[in-house]
C-alpha cells in the first residue's frame, strides 16, 4: 500500500467510521463485516453441515446435484435485507466478498465440499452487467474460493439470453422465463470437475435449475453443487 493509500485509509476511518450494515452499530475494525451482536443473531440455516437438507431437497426432483446449501434465511425488511440489497444493487462489493469468506470458511469446515475443483458464479447477461457495473455473485464466489483454496471460473458458463427480472413474476412463469437462458462456452475446462455454483438469493430456484441443466447438458461428466448465500423460506419449502 502506498503512503497516499495508507493516509487515505486512516483519514476515511476517521471521517467515515465503519458501521455494521445490519444494525448500524460502530465496528471496532474496518476489517469486520458485522458487529458481534449481529454475528450471534444471524439467521443462519445450518444447511451446509447436512448432506440432505431443504436446499438439496428443493433440487432433487429436477436436477442432479452433489451438495447444496444456503448460509442465511432471507429475512424481508430490516437490516439483513439491507445487507443483501447493499451488495446486490448498491455496489457494496466488499460486503459480498466478506460474506463469501464467512460462508466459504463454514463450507470448508463442514467437510462436504472438500473435493470442489472450482467455483462458478451465476453469470449475468452482458447487458445487465453493463447496467449494474458488476456481478455480485462473482464477489461472493471470490470469497468462497479463497477459503476453499480453489479457483473461480467466470468465463465458461454464460447467460446467453436476456431475461426480464424474476422478482415480480408468478412462480409458475419463472421456469419458462429462464429456460435456455444459459450456455457453456468452454466445456473442456469443466470436464470431470466438481463445480460449486454460487448465487445470491435462492427464491424459487428456477434460475439455478436452468443453469444446472445447461451445464449438465454440455458437460455430462461434471458434478455440480450449489451454494446460495440466502434462501427464502418459501423457496426451500419451510413455512416457519
Ligand atoms: Zn450489527
Image: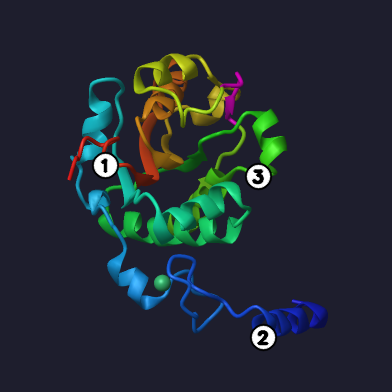
Q: Quadrant of ligand 1?
A: bottom left
Q: Secondary structure at mark 2?
A: helix
Disc on res. 134: 3
Q: Position of residue 10 (x, y in %)?
A: 70, 85
Residue 165, compared with residue 103, is above or below; it is above
Q: How is the image coloured?
A: rainbow
List the single residue furthest toward the front: 77
Residue 69 x %, y %: 30, 44
Q: Position of residue 146 (x, y in %)?
A: 50, 57
- Majority secondary structure of magenta residues: loop
Q: Judge whether 158 appears above or below 40 on screen.
A: above
Q: CA gap, disc 1 to disc 3?
A: 27 Å
Does residue 218 belong to the magenta stretch? Answer: no
Q: Quadrant of residue 8?
A: bottom right
Q: Is residue 44 visible?
A: yes
**Nearer mark to the viewer, of 3 and 2:** 2
What is the span of residues highlighted in magenta in the rendered image? 156-163
Amino acid at each position: 500500500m502506498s503512503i497516499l493509500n495508507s493516509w487515505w485509509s486512516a483519514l476515511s476511518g476517521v471521517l467515515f467510521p465503519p458501521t455494521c450494515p445490519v444494525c448500524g452499530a460502530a465496528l471496532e475494525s474496518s476489517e469486520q463485516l458485522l458487529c458481534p451482536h449481529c454475528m450471534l443473531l444471524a439467521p443462519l440455516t445450518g444447511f451446509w453441515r447436512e448432506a440432505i437438507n431443504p436446499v438439496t431437497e428443493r433440487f432433487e426432483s429436477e436436477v442432479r446435484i452433489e451438495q447444496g446449501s444456503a448460509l442465511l434465511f432471507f429475512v424481508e425488511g430490516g437490516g439483513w435485507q439491507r445487507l443483501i440489497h447493499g451488495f446486490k444493487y448498491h455496489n457494496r462489493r466488499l460486503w459480498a466478498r466478506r460474506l463469501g469468506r464467512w460462508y466459504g470458511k463454514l463450507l470448508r469446515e463442514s467437510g462436504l465440499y472438500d473435493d470442489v475443483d472450482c467455483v462458478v458464479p451465476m453469470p449475468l447477461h452482458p447487458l445487465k452487467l453493463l447496467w449494474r457495473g458488476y456481478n455480485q455473485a462473482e464477489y461472493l464466489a471470490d470469497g468462497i474460493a479463497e477459503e476453499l483454496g480453489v479457483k473461480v471460473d467466470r468465463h465458461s458458463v454464460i447467460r446467453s439470453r436476456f431475461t426480464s427480472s424474476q422478482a415480480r413474476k408468478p412462480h409458475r412463469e419463472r421456469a419458462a422465463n429462464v429456460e435456455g437462458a444459459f450456455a457453456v462456452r468452454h466445456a473442456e475446462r469443466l470436464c470431470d470437475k466438481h463445480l460449486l455454483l454460487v448465487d445470491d438469493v435462492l427464491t424459487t430456484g428456477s434460475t439455478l435449475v436452468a443453469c444446472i441443466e445447461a451445464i449438465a447438458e454440455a458437460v455430462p461428466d461434471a458434478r455440480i453443487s450449489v451454494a446460495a448465500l440466502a434462501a427464502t423460506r418459501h423457496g426451500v419449502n419451510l413455512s416457519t
